[in-house]
Every structure is written in structure tokens, then in C-alpha cells.
Image (cartoon, coloured by chain):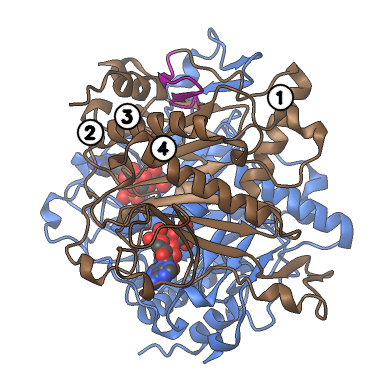
Chain colours: A brown, B blue
Amino acid sequence: MATENRNPEIRKDAVNNRLVILSPARSRRPSDIKSKSQSKPDSNPTQCPFCAGNEHQCAPEIFRFPEDSTSDWKVRVIENLYPALSRQLQVKSDNEEHRQANGSTGEVSLRGFGFHDVVIESPNHSVHLQDLSPAGIAVVLLAYKKRIEQLCAVESISYIQVFKNHGASAGASMSHSHSQILALPVIPTIASNRLNTMKEHHNQTGKCSLCNINTHKLLINESTHFISISPFASTFAFETWIIPRYHSSHYHQLDEDKAIDLGGILKLTLEKLSLQLNDPPYNLMIHTSPLHIVSSELPYTHWYIQIVPQLSTIGGFEMGTGCYINPVFPEDAAKILREVQLP
Amino acid sequence: MATENRNPEIRKDAVNNRLVILSPARSRRPSDIKSKSQSKPDSNPTQCPFCAGNEHQCAPEIFRFPEDSTSDWKVRVIENLYPALSRQLQVKSDNEEHRQANGSTGEVSLRGFGFHDVVIESPNHSVHLQDLSPAGIAVVLLAYKKRIEQLCAVESISYIQVFKNHGASAGASMSHSHSQILALPVIPTIASNRLNTMKEHHNQTGKCSLCNINTHKLLINESTHFISISPFASTFAFETWIIPRYHSSHYHQLDEDKAIDLGGILKLTLEKLSLQLNDPPYNLMIHTSPLHIVSSELPYTHWYIQIVPQLSTIGGFEMGTGCYINPVFPEDAAKILREVQLP
Ligand SMILES: Nc1ncnc2c1ncn2[C@@H]1O[C@H](COP(=O)(O)OP(=O)(O)O[C@H]2O[C@H](CO)[C@@H](O)[C@H](O)[C@H]2O)[C@@H](O)[C@H]1O
Ligand SMILES: Nc1ncnc2c1ncn2[C@@H]1O[C@H](COP(=O)(O)OP(=O)(O)O[C@H]2O[C@H](CO)[C@@H](O)[C@H](O)[C@H]2O)[C@@H](O)[C@H]1O
């Protein structure tokens, strides 16, 4: 078995510049790794505000697809009932100081302005994202795009994070298939680190890190416009990235054709992870670029999707250092995922 | 109740420069927050290799306190049976290249050399760290110090992370009270970010960020040599820091007197968190400075302890952005923890 021959390695890549310890001794054989907590739907969909028929239990709708649908909607984008940031706070900002900085302590605080929305991916409680057709997933992907375009119009928004929590141990409090969109008035650390790392690589090599990503032994699948890979410095076991093969800085540049193609490879990826790892909880993140980048930044900014199955609990080492211990070499994960046979 | 008057806020401090969203709307009242999963010991201590009498089931011992004790040891420091990094890999490094960098992809890999040890904090399966006396905790703290001093002698070690996982949802796979020490050949991201942030603050103000930390409404307790606070930009609800009041760059500068004083405030902190939050799982991290810092870095490097009770699961937003959503304002957490009455 591959792992028996492997020594631990410390790696980082030219995308996130994040250290990871690959440590096969910490785990069973990669092919035996399964999720302990499955992401089973709960048994009481009549209580679920995201189900068709319960729309009145939700916070206000922003739009639905198809736009003129009634009870036969496919996707709804709604306000989050418990938003992390407040869309009201902006109003006050003419009178009040938005940013407070304390010179002697160096502390900074901003009023928590921002948008926090929920995307309901299906009217049906038991249909998960991977159960939709490629075209059905494309409807969800295009709902993200449309909402991002709306949020781009708000000047003080700097960054938009689209993410999905699937299963309780991936943080999901609702089991009905959904994702979230958070629009922030600041550029978060991981995005600015990525920008800096990709800029440095571009300065040194003239290349975009993601156009030239290492696929040697790491490729899982490819479609017309996308590839899926196990990244060289995977922070988690079976972490998977879906990357556009064409250079594109912002997710919301996605068009309808490419959305269907992306829907296909995303469905394939989720189905493979689910079959191989026993329906694990997972997080999906769209890593795009800050909204207001200048044209000189375009050559080295490139969006991608990160999918992380939740197979273990992190501990104090990861919290203390920011360095993750991953028991599965991405070369092994890629081989296993490449070879998964779907029924 | 305090939270009803609070709007969400985005904060960062001059220690870690890490963004956090404080968002009271996401949660119950801070005083009602309790841990759902308690950190109960398992029921089968006869099977536990960390118990007195089962020493032969453990990986090799490095030392014990008292040093000449037999079955009456108080603390044992042993090798980790499943080390994340390998202490053997160094031997080869004369013949082999330790670091491999791929110029065209920008990827870097290091062979996974390092030390990974376990500190068994008590011979007794049901005695947890907070159950020890201040002097008993000091024995554990001085075992960390001694092991760090030994590891400092290994030239290629750059950083040492001491951490503790308590309870399964804080990552602990063993319930017998223990902590871990990982010695790394690289400086991890969080430590180098902290160094840069504290340097910048020192350049701007001439002050050490931690000597001058904001305690206004944030102080929990103080002892002769230490304070405990809820940090201004707390990433987690009820996150607590214990900071030396004297300026000191490295944890292993701790002497015996200060260790007993630290044992006292650490015991108090853990007892208060346990009582207030219903014995939550927690992680404890010692944030020290890289081993080989130069004397010009001494004025702005200052070690401290971070304790994070695990009260919720993080989701895709935190994984995607590195920005945490914390439902409890540290001012509220500090007030609650200040007022906890121990029996
Ligand atoms: N009737 C209704 N109308 C509109 N919206 C409704 C609603 N009922 C519930 N909601 C919202 O629906 C969302 C469902 O989201 P998830 O299940 O993905 O996780 P949640 O955001 O709770 O927290 C997880 O994700 C966040 C962000 O990553 C982490 O901070 C957190 O720890 C983790 O548990 C919640 O944000 C909730 O506020
Ligand atoms: N007989 C024996 N002799 C010597 N050592 C023995 C032993 N039996 C077990 N051990 C070691 O004891 C340690 C106990 O550590 P913890 O319970 O704190 O968490 P663990 O390291 O498993 O993982 C948690 O912490 C790490 C680091 O934060 C995370 O990567 C991980 O996801 C999380 O679950 C383990 O590292 C184990 O290898």
C-alpha cells in the first residue's frame, strides 16, 4: 500500500502559501477512510422553512429561479433570518464614523455592515445538490452569479464569500440543501494572502499559479472547461479543487454554458466523494477575487472551488499554528477518486 | 440584556491582525450558552496506556517528574506513538536534499522532520488538569519548559507548539489528561503573522502589544505575574488569554515561582469556564516566539496562553475566509467570567 512507503512531508503551494504536514502514520490506509457521521436528512420536513409551501416561514425573498415561477420554483435566494452582518447599518454611516481605530492599542473595529443571504437549492427536502442534474446544478450556480452581480453594485462591499455547509459536523444547522452568500466590507485574510501569493508567483515566473497548477499524479477528472484535482498542499484528507481551465479572475464571469459544464463536474465530484467516503459532511467554498481589483491584478487572479469533506476534528495544533496535519497524501487521494466507479 | 443593544462589529487587534465578526444575533444570550457535548471521561481506564501501571503500553519515555520517581510519578513526557513528524528523518539529511522546490509551479516540500511528544499530566485517569493544585499544575508547566529546552538544542528546530485537546469535539482521541508538544523545522503562519503584527505595532508606538493589551471591560482575573482577559478580537465565544504581566518573549523563560502563580490562574480560568459553560471541550495553546529570534525582536515578542472552549462547529465561511463569526462580544464574556462564583 502506497502509504507504507511514504515519510511525512511539509508542503506549501503557490496559491495559498499555507503550510501543511502530510503525515500518513496518523491514519488508516487512505482507501479505508470513511466518514463516521453521515449527513442524513432529518425526519421532520414539515417543520422545514426551506421546503416548498413553507415560504412564509422564511426571511424575505430576494429572487427566485425561474423568475416568474410560483409554487414550482427551482431555487430561491432569501435573506438570512439570523444574519452575521447587518444590511441596515450602512444607512447610519453618513452620520457616524464607520471605522474606529485605537492608536495606542492598535485595535480596529468596523461597524458590521454587510449582506448575508441563503440560497435554497431545491424546493424538495430530500434532494441534495448532487442529486440535481448538471443543468439543475447550473441553476444554483447562476443564482450565485446573479446575487453576486447585485451585491457588486454596493460600493462598500469588498469581497463576497459563497459557501455551503452539508451535514451537522460541517456546521449545517439546516439539513434542507442550501448554501450561503456573505458580502463583506473588508477583504478577508485568506483572500488577501492568496492574492499576495499569486502575485509573487506571477512576478517570478510570469504565470498564473492556477492556470499552471501541478496536475502530475493529482488530476481527478476534467471537463470541457474545468479540471478537478487533489491540491499539492491539501489541508484536509480528500480535499478537492475544481478549477476553470480558462483564466478568469471572478466567479461571476461564469456564463450559462460553462455553468452547465461546471454543474457536471461538480456533480461527479460530490458523487465520488459521497460514494468513497460514505456520504461525509462537507464544506464547499468558492474562492473568487476581491471585487475592486485593478487591471494589473487580472493576470494572476483566478477563481476556483474548494470542497473539504469533514472526516476528523481539528485540534489545538491546527488552531495554534494555522498548519494542518493531513494523514492522506493528495497523490493517494487523487488516485482513489480517479478510480471510483459510480453505479 | 447586553446583547440586545449590540450591533454586529468587525474587529482586529494588534497581536494577530485577524478579522473577526462579532454577531450577537447569531446566538442565545451569552449567559445561556452551554456546551452540548461534555468532556466526560470514558469508562474503561484499565485499557488506557497513559494510566500508572500501563507505562509499558506507551511509546518510549523522555523523562518524568519527579525524576527519580518509580510508580509514584506525577508527570511523564513520552514520545507520541503516531508522530505527525519524524525524529528519524534528520539522520538522512546529510545525504539527501531536505527541501525541494519546484520553480515552475512554485511548490515547496520539506521532509517531515520534527519531534512530537505527549505530556501525561497525571498518573490517574480521572484527574484533569484543573483538578490539580496550583503547584501540581506547575509541575506540568515546568515539564513543558524542560522539554522545550531540550528541543532548543536541535539546531534545525524553528518553532515549538505546546497544545492541549480536552474532550472529543476539541479533537482529543485520548480522554486521560494530557497535552502535546510539536517541534517544527519551520515557523508556522500564525506565529509569523503575530511576529509581523507586533513588530509593526512596536514600530508605530514603541510599545509591545501584549504589555499594553486592552483590559478595559475585558479583564477577567489577575495574579501576581499574570492577567486573564477576553481578547478584544476574540475568534470564539468565551476565548480567554492568560498573559504574563512582565515582558517575556519565550514561554521557557518561566521560573518555578511564576509557574506556581500561572498554575493558580490557569486552574481558576479552567474552573470558571467549566462551571459557566457546563464542562466544555477545549483547546489550550501556548503562543511563544520562534526559537532563533534576534535581539532586536525581543522588545515586541511576548508569549501568552490561549484557551478556546469548543461551543460550536465552524463552517464554510470560516474555512473560506479565515474570518470567524463569534456570537459573544468579549466584553460580555469577560463580565460573565469575572462574576462566576466557584463553590
Ligand atoms: N426561516 C429562515 N429564513 C431564513 N434563513 C433562515 C431561516 N432559518 C434558518 N435560517 C438560516 O439558514 C442558515 C443555514 O445555514 P447552515 O445550516 O449552513 O449553518 P449556519 O449558518 O447555521 O452556521 C454554520 O455556518 C456558519 C458560517 O460558516 C458558522 O459560523 C457556524 O458556526 C456554522 O454552524 C443559517 O445561517 C440560519 O440563520
Ligand atoms: N500508547 C501510546 N503511547 C504514546 N502516544 C500515544 C499512545 N496512544 C496514543 N498516543 C498519542 O496520544 C495522542 C493523544 O492526543 P489527542 O487526544 O490530544 O489528539 P490527537 O493527537 O489524536 O488528534 C487531535 O489533535 C491533532 C493535532 O491538533 C489533530 O490533527 C487531530 O485532528 C485531532 O483529533 C495522540 O496524538 C496519539 O498518537
Q: CA distance from mark 4 to mark 1?
A: 24 Å
User: Ligand 1 lies in which image quarter?
Assistant: bottom left
x and y, in percent, of residue B30 in the image: 46, 81
The residue wearing badge 1 is A201
**Is A35 contained in the magenta span?**
no
Label 2: state its secondary structure: helix
Q: Is residue B195 left or right of residue B200?
A: left
Count neighbours of disc 1 (C-alpha within 10 A) and say few if under 14, some if 14 to 19, many if 20 or more: many
Q: Which mark is residue A275?
A: 2
Give, as a three-letter code, the residue at label 2.
Leu
In the structure shown, which secondary structural element does the residue marked by tag 1 occupy?
Answer: helix
Would residue A2 appear left or right of B183 to someone viewing this image? left
Q: Are marks 2 and 4 on the same chain?
A: yes
Callout 2: few (<14), some (14-19), or many (20+) C-alpha neighbours within 10 Å? some
Which of the chains bears the disc numbered 2? Answer: A
| Mark 2 or 4, closer to the camera | 2
Element on which disc 3 rests:
helix
Q: Chain of mark 4?
A: A
- Rendering coords of residue A160 (x, y %): 61, 52
Q: Which residues are magenta?
A: A217-234
Q: Earlier in the sequence, mark 2 or mark 4?
A: 4
Q: Which residue is mark 3?
A: A25
Q: Are marks 1 and 2 in contact (CB under 8 Å)?
A: no
Disc number for residue B328: none
**Gap between marks 2 and 4, in whole Å?**
18 Å
Marks 4 & 3, CB-CB < 8 Å contact: no
| Front disc: 1 or 3 | 1
Q: Are marks 1 and 3 in contact (CB under 8 Å)?
A: no
Q: Quadrant of the C terminus of chain B?
A: bottom left
